[in-house]
Amino acid sequence: MANLKSLAKDTAIYGLSSIVGRFLNYLLVPLYTAALSAAGGGYGVITNVYAYTALLLVILTYGMETTFFRFSNKEGEDPARVYSTTLVSVGFTSLVFVALVLTFISPISSAMGYADHPSYIWVMAITVALDAFQCIPFAYLRYKKRPVKFAALKLANILMSIALNLVFFLVLPKWYESTGGEGIVGKIYSPEVGVGYAFYINLFCSGALMLLLVKELTGFKYVFDRALLRRMLSYSWPILVLGIAGILNQTADKILFPYIYHGADAHSQLGIYGAASKIAMIMAMITQAFRYAYEPFVFGKAKDKDNRDTYAKAMKFFVIFTLLAFLAVIGYMDILKHLIGRDYWEGLKVVPIVMAAEIMMGVYFNLSFWYKLIDKTIWGAWFSGAGCLVLVLVNVIFVPRYGYMACAWAGFAGYGTAMLLSYFVGQRHYPINYPVKEMLLYVAAAIVLCALMRHANAALPIWAAVGVNTLLLAVFAAIIIKRDFPIGEILKKVRR
């Protein structure tokens, strides 16, 4: 129980930075969707370019975060040597990537559909290279169990980004308009740059973050151990394949959409889908917070006798609280929809589907540790690859006919495939007695309550729907308290 308390504490701290950070980033969604109309496709450009960025980040880290945790906790390995070797390796590959992009910037930007804006691509390349390198010192902070500094640096970076975005998308445009571009504002701002400022700001913030990580990058002797790196790469390459397949499950639709959607308004439709999906990202926040705490927790506890029982309990509570968050978003949709501009509201129908897919992704992440703990990460590559194949096929077949709705269902099908494969194969190779029946009861209750909430949203005035949905959310909370958090018993133990 003490281990679960430690996990809960770290998850709360990581979760605070993740949830608060994502919430603060949500401020950019109404800002972008107000400044960039749906018809203009500007937010579609952001959605598309950042989808490439997410994929490249996985490629440029090539599983070395997880590999760093695994080897730092291995008997006979020197954690300092592991850290130094990982830094050198990821830093070198990031530099090579930037050099290649800058060398071939014209054909690359043309192939991506941004021949008129190559700066979007080279700025993105440098930014993602910096982010990839920074993943390692951030992993080191997690390894050293320093969640407070981790959270502080993440939040500082986000606050800086938001401040600059407010300046360049709200303050300066109004100033420019009021003065006709005369004076100093005309020297620091140009409306022709438009959406490009989002990418320039991201690059500036990533560069500034490097300065804040100086302590984690200095004060020790850099050592590059080739033999160690070979062992690490043999462990990490299946994680890379797994990661590519996994991130494609999140981004393939946004990358493929402009190529397979037959309408002339591809970026406009993609922007609507991307903006609406942002509301569903509360699931990604919870999953990410849990991942930051759970990964070092699992590898550090691998030798304990009761580890499988702990993993089963952690899975159950993860499912319970993600379902609670799911219902909260559905219940207060009429309020949350104001996070995006009215031009984008037609895409809100994808939110429940995208959230359900994110829950399955989180379950799949929890299940994934069985093959990581027995050093059989190739299984993860197969599972994620199968899920990715399903996702791509659904997109290619159905997007031309159903548009972005097919994107939402493709993610659902892809994550569901990977989750089920990992569970059934894992029970044969590393059996864990997950409380499946109990979790399915919670899922069934959530489905029923979700249907009632959606009916209330459609049939009642906003104030009445919010009231009814609050009661339904309280019903689900009461079920949780009754079954798994008996307050009376907990209070008795506290008094003792």
Image (tube, rainbow, N blue to C red):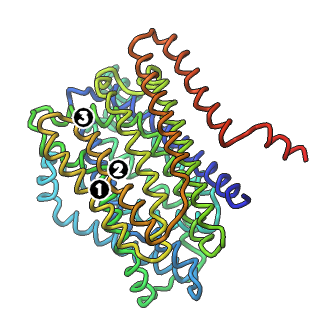
Q: Which residue is mark 1?
A: 387
Lower sequence index among marks 3 and 1: 1
Residue 306 has which mark?
none
Which residue: 50% across, 73% down? Answer: 373
In the structure shown, which secondary structural element does the residue marked by tag 1 occupy? helix
Query: Camera-side residue: 18 or 315?
Result: 315
Q: Which residue is mark 3?
A: 405
Q: Which residue is mark 2?
A: 416
In the structure shown, which secondary structural element does the residue marked by tag 2 occupy? helix
Q: What's under tag 1, amino acid-wise?
A: Gly
Alpha carbon separation for disc pair 2 and 1: 7 Å
Lower sequence index among marks 2 and 1: 1
Tell me the crowding category of disc 2: few under 14, some 14 to 19, or many 20 or more residues within 10 angstroms, Cα based. Answer: many
For discs 3 and 1, the disc positioned in front in the rendered view: 1
**Which residue, as the protein is rendered here, is positioned at the far front?**
437
Query: Disc 2, disc 3: CB below 8 Å?
Result: no
Q: Using the rendered view, name the quadrant where residue 280 is placed.
A: top left
Query: Disc 2, disc 1: CB below 8 Å?
Result: yes
Q: What's under tag 3, amino acid-wise?
A: Met
Lower sequence index among marks 2 and 3: 3
**Which residue, as the protein is rendered here, is positioned at the far bottom?**
227
Q: Position of residue 158 (x, y in %)?
A: 49, 45
Which residue: 41% across, 24% down? Answer: 337
